[in-house]
């Protein structure tokens, strides 16, 4: 194991190899987040807060005969809206390199539809199976989010916009995250009640996910600390940070515990 570790670190310490590794881990994390979203949708117990609005819009499209509208497309639209909001709120402080969020959430959105298609062949016709899928979605979301944060490149826009709100308002990231989730859930519930005549996609599973996804991220972070060497320290800064360095409330709490970020990683600087 020691020899493998030494060889791995030597192989991925170079600039190009290190960047490629970080990009790969980021994209793997995005695919796993997409799987978590698809699992929560397939469970039918209510999706996680961040995907509740796209899920409701998808249901409305199906009911109104717009069957070509998919959850992946609605997820893409929400992320695109959040990316635009980031640029608008930050103004000249927005680094164009942050547009690299686009291919990440494009892959995530496409993966959501791919996973939903694959899961359509798996039955979820009992409450026990629904609970199992919900718990699996929470665990998968936790792992995916942890892997997305670890390379310290770009965040998905729905997470990045929370960081921007935190920076602009001076409030803690956790408080802004809760507010964002409440806004998304409330909007999804209101839209569902108004158009579909009942609560769709916002159910007990939504509450359970809100309580447990953060804990799952923490558990995966602790479990993966032994693999910190998998991403060797970056030889230089690859991506300028979304929020200017030294911002009082900009960094999300989860970044501090990025599971695969090796000790000694360079701080991002402008």
Image (spheres, rainbow, N blue to C red):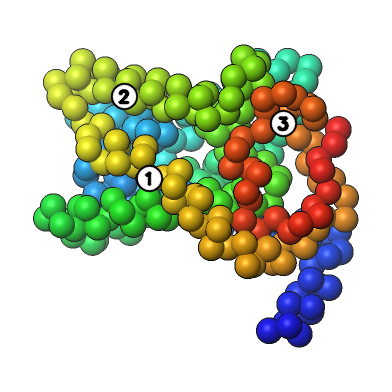
206 left or right of 108 in image: left
In this view, the residue in front, 243 or 77, is: 243
Residue at the spot of label 3: 242
- Label 3's element? loop
Q: Nearer the viewer, mark 1 or mark 2?
A: 1
CA gap between label 1 and label 3 equals 27 Å
Disc 3 packing (10 Å; few <14; some 14–19; many ≥20): many
Real-space CA distance between mark 2 and mark 3, rounded to the nearest whole angstrom: 28 Å
Q: Residue at x 68, y 63 (%)?
A: 228
Q: Position of residue 255 (x, y in %)?
A: 64, 43
Residue 214 position, x and y percent, is 45, 43
Q: Is residue 97 above or below residue 244?
A: below
* Res 58 quadrant in image: top left
* Residue identified by numbered label 2: 188
Is residue 120 visible in the rendered image? The answer is no
The correct choice, above or below, for 179 with respect to 141 in the image is: above
Q: Please give the label number shown on residue 175.
A: none
Q: Residue, x 25% and y 27% (percent of image)?
A: 60
**Observer able to see residue 128:** yes
The answer to which quarter of the image holds residue 182 is top left
CB-based contact (under 8 Å), mark 2 and mark 3: no
Q: Earlier in the sequence, mark 2 or mark 3?
A: 2
Seen in the picture, residue 236 relative to 60 is either above or below; the reply is below
Image quarter of residue 224: bottom right
Q: Residues within 10 Å of mark 1 (few under 14, many from 20)?
A: some
Mark 1 or 3, which is nearer the eye? 1
Callout 1: SS: helix
Residue designated by label 1: 212
The first of marks 1 and 3 along the sequence is 1
């Amino acid at each position: 194991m020691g020899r493998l570790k030494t060889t791995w670190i030597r192989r991925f310490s170079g600039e190009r190899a290190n960047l490629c590794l970080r990009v790969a881990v980021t994209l793997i994390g995005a695919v796993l987040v997409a799987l978590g979203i698809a699992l929560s949708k397939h469970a039918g117990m209510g999706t996680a807060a961040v995907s509740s609005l796209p899920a409701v819009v998808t249901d409305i499209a199906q009911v109104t005969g717009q069957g070509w509208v998919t959850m992946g497309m609605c997820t893409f639209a929400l992320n695109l809206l959040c990316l635009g909001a980031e640029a608008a709120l930050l103004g000249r402080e927005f680094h164009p390199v942050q547009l690299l969020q686009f291919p990440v959430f494009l892959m995530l959105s496409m993966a959501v539809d791919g996973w939903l298609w694959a899961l359509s062949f798996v039955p979820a016709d009992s409450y026990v199976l629904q609970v199992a899928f919900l718990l699996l979605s929470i665990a998968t979301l936790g792992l995916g989010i942890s892997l997305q944060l670890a390379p310290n490149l770009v965040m998905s826009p729905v997470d990045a916009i929370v960081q921007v709100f935190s920076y602009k308002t001076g409030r803690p990231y956790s408080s802004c995250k809760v507010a964002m989730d409440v806004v998304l859930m409330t909007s999804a519930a209101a839209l569902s009640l108004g158009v579909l005549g009942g609560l769709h996609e916002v159910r007990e599973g939504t509450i359970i996910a809100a309580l447990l996804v953060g804990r799952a991220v923490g558990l995966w972070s602790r479990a993966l600390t032994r693999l910190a060497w998998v991403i060797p320290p970056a030889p230089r800064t690859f991506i300028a940070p979304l929020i200017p360095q030294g911002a009082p409330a900009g960094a999300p709490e989860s970044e501090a515990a990025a599971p695969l970020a090796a000790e000694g990683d360079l701080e991002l600087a402008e």
